Image (tube, rainbow, N blue to C red):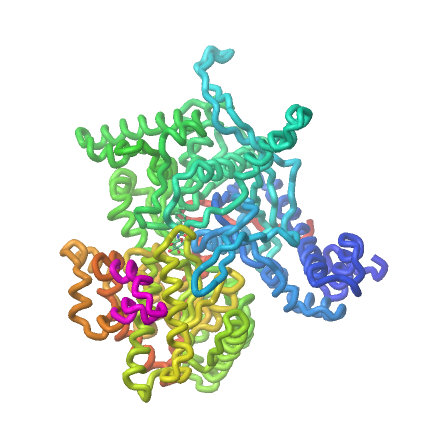
Amino acid sequence: SESGHDVRTGLDAASLSQAVCDYLYYFQGRHPATASRNDFYLATAYAVRDRLFQRGVQSLDALLHRPDGRTVAYLSAEFLMGPQLAANLVNLGIHDAMREALWRMDIRLEDMIEHEVEPGLGNGGLGRLAACYLDSLATLEIPAIGYGIRYEFGIFSQQIRDGWQVELTDKWLHLGYPWELARPERAVAVRFGGYTEPYTDEDGRYRVRWIPGEIVKGVPHDTPILGYRVKTCNLLRLWRAEAVQTFDFSAFNIGDYARAVEEQVTSETISKVLYPNDASPQGKALRLKQQYFFVACAIQDMLRAHLRFGGRPETFHKRWAAQLNDTHPTVAVPELMRLLLDDHGLEWEEAWDVTQKTFGYTNHTLLPEALETWPIDLFGALLPRHLEIVFEINRRLCDGIRRVYPGDEDRVRRMSLIEEQGRRSLRMANLACVGSHAINGVAALHTELLKSQVLSDWVAMFPERFCNVTNGVTPRRFVVVANPGLSGLLDRTTGDDWPVHLDALRRLEPHAEDAEFRRRWREVKRENKRQLAAVIRDRTGIAVDPDSLFDIQVKRIHEYKRQHLNVLHILTLYRRLKQNPDLDVVPRTFVFGGKAAPGYHVAKLIIKLITATGDLVNDDPDVRGRLKVVFFPNFSVKNGEMIYPAADLSEQISTAGQEASGTGNMKFSLNGALTIGTLDGANIEIRDEVGADNFFLFGLTADEVRSAKAGGYHPRGVYEQNEELRAVVDLIASGALAGGDAALFRSLVDGLLWHDPFMVLADYQSYVDCQTRVAALWRDPDAWSRMSILNVARMGKFSSDRSIRDYCERVWHVGPLGVPTEG
Ligand code: 26W
């Protein structure tokens, strides 16, 4: 360009400013004077993307020049990436330069960041974990590629109307998504349906061919994933389904326009929308189609790369380590077998060895309703060849079980890939276990429960396959990007290497005793709370006091996560105030956020309960502003980045034994919130790290929950014997929160009184008592700050970098690949 700046690669403000300007003119056809905010946003994003692609090309080049070594393929039906602009600027190290560059054009970087629409291609924990892991893989310079689905519509956007959740279609692509590049030339074909037939090949060998009934095209869309302050730039490759032949002219010629585009419509439905269910799968053919679609695209892509660079089919596992993010991509096991057997002519034993060495399986939940199964008839109609292969895998598996456990037919029945009761179905967790060399849970307790309960038969037979990898989160997005105030203070206090060596935060510990430091610590939190209060006011109309205790629970709405236990506590405080308006209670702001699966009625009723509690409490003169209850609509990664840094208290109150890990618990604690929580998931390890004195523990243990249930738990008895609990439950049942409609919450109340599978009533008193201890500590700001500082100082273990190192060592057997400085 005329000024001589390096418009594609330069990292200084002048080059960046020129780059944004060039994009405005020559790519969007806009003059800066007339350009819209979206024009500027797109131009800024493209300028950043150039710098990512430059590093992406160099990373690929480094990979191609390496004679051996494995690349990680992270197979996941969900990637919840969050906004890209700020995170990429931080990883590139040009946040300040870009702010300056835009400022020269009278544009505020903050406005650009605020303008960005995030791709919500995930439901919650599992999808966000995949995104954190991509960030860490790149930061640790591990060659990796994330494979998934480019849903046209991601997780619905949530509005609250009259206190109820309303779902709106998530049109994240409508203003253009600048971070990806479509690669139509790399499209692959995916087959469905039809039938198989045996034949004899030239060598006289028995072979099988699959004659499909339908073919769909998968078009890859690539998003570059740059590590933090390193040259490594990996790839997220998401597949979009397209019709092979988009227009049927024979139909069109006779005037049947609808039929002419029919094939296109049905093919493209595959990647149309993310299923918004967290935990309970609906055995829908379209979901199985989605799963096979992206897995078939991914494995073809991997195999093509492998063969292209001189690999042989039988050495596939030496170049690729593929991770199954829960069972959703498990059809990859028979798919790789099919390619090796049918297309490449390997013998069964050799193909099976390659397949097992390729895959690792991560389990993310113990909820029985979440264990995926597919009716055999449905599976066979869609994937007839895969069903044959599954049957053969199962025959060999069952033979093996009988050899080790002669006569134990009950064990064979339990471990079989096929559930024979009722509608015969394929158990995906069993398929994942038999097809993988490594199986892991996502927190210590979760792995133990997997081993002792859900997968105990598998541990008995294949003990060496099991390991634990405790989840982690990326401190780049969740501290550097989300909490610049805290980041600055950490940089000045401990040095600036903590984003990549999170253990370095230990250096904070001595400062917990420094009164001046504690004051600065509180100032940072107070400013974050002020900002969140402004957003809350803007989005809900509710005025909250930044000096009150911000008590926050954000996560998917689910009975096992017990948002309603939190509500019982709020109503307990409310009743105490009604009885004695002069009572000295700590002023609190309760914030909730999270989506309910659209078909999960109880979860939607819990949202209504929260908003109704807000309506009751927020303007009651007896409360005098001391309790505020806010439902923050449309919780997302973007909203999370505002919420976590403003929390004083993190609610991690699931029934012990139910939450596999939780990752929000880590995001809160890393941002200086104290946790009130049960001994569940990673809470246990967080408490071990930060110290029992710095964690508010309550509730039954997983063992106690189990024995309470075995001994016959009677929630009604708990209710009858606890006066305050009874009054609060009666308040809900009375209709006082529902304009006098006693029917509204009846199902919820009856569920608690007569069943209470998640032990809400059993844990009520312990929770309320624990909240009393929280309030007492809050009255001593120095003690609170000391604990908050120690929490942050001791969170090093929960960096996703540590998790990824664990996977590299225990599961993938891969190491870093440095990218040469100049490409
Ligand atoms: C539709 C079926 C289905 C089944 C399971 C959809 C989604 C799931 C996921 C396994 C649910 C999920 O996100 N699990 C969460 O995974 C996180 C990352 O490991 C953990 O931190 C959470 O505890 C776990 O609930």
Residue 786 screen position, x and y as percent: 39, 79
Residue 395 falls left or right of residue 526: left
Residue 271 screen position, x and y as percent: 54, 41
Q: Residue furthest left?
A: 711
Residue 86 falls left or right of residue 30: left
Q: Nearer the viewer, residue 159 or 661?
A: 159
Residue 140 higher or lower than 101, as above or below: above
Q: Nearer the viewer, residue 261 or 337?
A: 261
Q: Can residue 791 be seen by looking at this rendering? A: no
How many numbered marks does the figure carry?
0
Residue 440 screen position, x and y as percent: 36, 47
Q: Can residue 329 be seen by looking at this rendering? A: yes
Task: Tell me the magenta residue range.
Answer: 730-751
Residue 653 higher or lower than 821, as above or below: below
Residue 381 higher or lower than 8, as above or below: above
Q: Residue furthest bottom?
A: 582
Q: Residue furthest right?
A: 2
Q: Residue at x 43, y 14 (%)?
A: 206
Q: Is residue 407 magenta?
A: no
Q: Is residue 749 magenta?
A: yes
Q: Nearer the viewer, residue 298 or 510?
A: 298
Q: Quadrant of the N terminus?
A: bottom right
Quadrant in which residue 799 is drawn: bottom left
Residue 699 falls left or right of residue 474: left
Quadrant in which residue 262 is drawn: top right
Q: Residue at x 22, y 57 (%)?
A: 755
Residue 791 screen position, x and y as percent: 40, 72
